[in-house]
Image (tube, coloured by chain):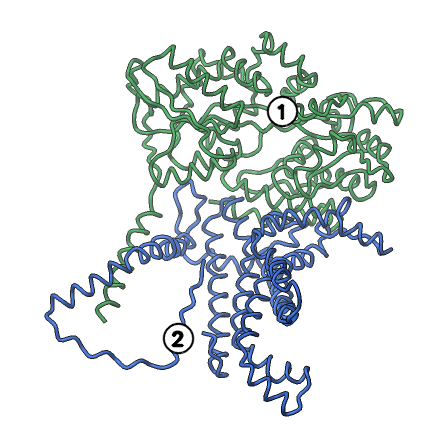
Amino acid sequence: MTIARRNLAAAAAAVLFLGACTGGSGDDDGKDAAAGYDPAAAVTLTWWTGQTSEAETVAEKLAEDYHAAHPNVTIKTSAGAPTTDDLLTKLSAGFAGGSYPDISYAFGNWAGDLGASGKTQDLTAYVAEPSFGWSEIPAAAREVATANGKVIGVPALVDNLALIYNKKLFDDAGLAYPTDSWSWDDFRAAAKKLTHPATNTYGTAYSVSGSEDTTWHLWPLLWQHGGKILDGTKPAFNSDAGVAALETLRAMAVDDKSMYLDQTDEKYGPLFNSGHVAMMLSGPWSLLDIKGAKLSYGVSVLPGYNGDHQTVSGPDLWVLFNHDDANRAGAARDFIKWLTSAQTDAKWNLAVGNLPLRSTEKDTPEFAAYVKEYPGGQKFFENLANAKQARPTAAGYEVLSRNVGDAIAKVLQGAATPQAALDDAAKKSADALEN
Amino acid sequence: MSITFAATPRTASPAPPRARGRRGRSARRTLTGWAFAAPATLIVVGLSIFPAVWAFFISRTKWNGIAPAVDVGWRNYQRIAEDSDAAAAAQHTLVLTLLFVPGSILLGILIAVALNQRIALIGFYRTCIFVPYVASAAATGILASFVFNPQFGAANEALRRLGLPTQQFLESPREALLVICVIALWGEVGFTAVVYLAALQDIPQELVEAAVVDGAGRWRVFRHITLPELRPVTVFTAIWQTITAMQLFDLIFTTTRGGPLNSTQTVVYYIYELAFQTQRLGYGAAVAYLLFAVTMLLTIGVIWYSRRSGSEAF
């Protein structure tokens, strides 16, 4: 009896404790995190780079360079997590335990959630200073760094989707290479001609895993048709524009069978590299593997609808966190300003094979070297101007993305019509988006 | 979540005579007892019970792991009823369980009977059957996805040689769940086989001899002696394999990731997707609690039934 009562008391205590755990709130008090910052104060910053192997080595070298120039700032550099995907889990555990970094790499689609944590710095005023050169960074990337009206970080990486094609397959079929003025009809016709079931060769490929990779390839088409992902906090992708966009893909996958449907996200890249897919809608990250496969390739902007060739960008961020220590907050800002400056970024992004962050880097010798190594790089750089809209940073985008991904997968495998599938996805997502 | 089976004593032992020592002595004995039990208790409470209780509180919130959690009462549980994806996941789990549990029991008995023969190299055969069970399901899954690859896999090659039409296997929404079940059976049947093998060797030889003397043939011995003797073990394997089937995750993760078209998305995989892919920790915890409740009810039901019918598996 006494034991039972004691257990009851322990359980009640646990309940109270847990209640306290879940009831916490963000500590955003509206004060600038770096107010009263003393640039000469000795500080130690923790920097989670989210990078592996080679890029991590470059990052550590940069942190040492910065320390050499600013001896009072020590930067503890680490990848933060085994993969970039795991960083979010690490961060959420860090928030719960109170040990999170000063600066962390983050995927752009985490911005809404991270902004809602109340643990981020508000950089809106800081990046607005002319010396920061905020406008040199592509607009879509700046938009992603802004969560709920506040700038919570600085873009770390910019990219976009373009059309990469295998020149040899076009030559063999006697077709002209894709141009920057191609329409989706041109794309479809070429894909059909390039498809040869006998040799397992497809005109193009699309991921039907239902992940964000499936979803974000649809957004440029939606935008080109004049559609929107969200209307306020309501899903708007099931509009006529969305249906027309998805119908374009459906016709190729189901009617023409000119589209290789990849059940994972991982097969279409290698299939392109081995000459089984003639055209792939992908980003600059593919160039490294294509180069390794010694493929003769070309890059053009995405096919367009009514002359609109806009694309989607998937920027990643350096998110800055607030530790209620003005010196740490200020030092973190200065370090990130230095890291993302045109001069340092050329040694960072261009050196590890990414696009330059700032438009002013196009005249640097590093950019010339990059374009020489990756001939498609120039086109991807120019294509940044076509990234006019950004994916929403609203909390709940992850859920929406999953539902839209499932809808696309269903339609491309002939299991649903575009209208029905998108309506269903919109209905399922509505609840996660409202707060 | 691990389940611990406690053996029920068959006969109640007589209560020990009450210690008449001083209070201090009895307290010290209690303390000594707790000192022995404390490390294990701490581990169980800290790593099993505490997270489980905490998960219950999470299940009553809307939480993405980052932003502060918002209390939503029972809304997450109400939502499960309207969630068509959850219903589909439950259906997939049910189909998988209904195929896997009887399949692994029947195959297990068959193989155990075969392995119970006195033939040459029997130790080698027994090892062969058990090896897939020892191999991690992740490795099994990766291996199987090579075998069942529609373009280059050995399974389609075999079908081609036999002149049968080739299949899409894991890439077809209709076949994927069946293929997963086959792979799971291949991996798990070693376990039931070993359990049945031990049970077969436990059957008293005199029972069999008596039946033979009474003129029973091999089939009738099997039907009237062996099978009834295996019943307690079957209750155990049924519960164990049901839990295995309902919690199957690693195999799905390494082969289809719930696809194609979510046709292999089981409840556990759905929970993973909710909690760790789309960051809906509150809703994911609610579904997990529902799964826990169902598993618990099933287990209690089977135990109650087996106790009532006089079996002593638990």
x and y percent of residue A98 in the render? 33, 37
Q: Hey, what amino acid is under mark 1?
A: Ala
**Which of label 2 and label 1 is nearer to you?**
2
Residue under numbered circle 1: A387
Foreground of the two, B79 or A49: A49
The color chain B is rendered in: blue
Indicate left or right for B277 with A129 as reference: right
x and y percent of residue A408 in the render? 68, 43
Residue B153, above or below B107 = above
Residue under numbered circle 2: B8
Q: Hey, what amino acid is under mark 2?
A: Thr
Residue B26, above or below A121 = below
Which chain does the residue under circle 1 lie in?
Answer: A
x and y percent of residue A152 in the render? 44, 28
Assess disc 2: are there few (<14), some (14-19) or many (≥20) residues with their C-alpha within 10 Å of its C-alpha: few
The color chain A is rendered in: green
| Residue A356 found in image quarter | top right
x and y percent of residue B100 in the render? 62, 64
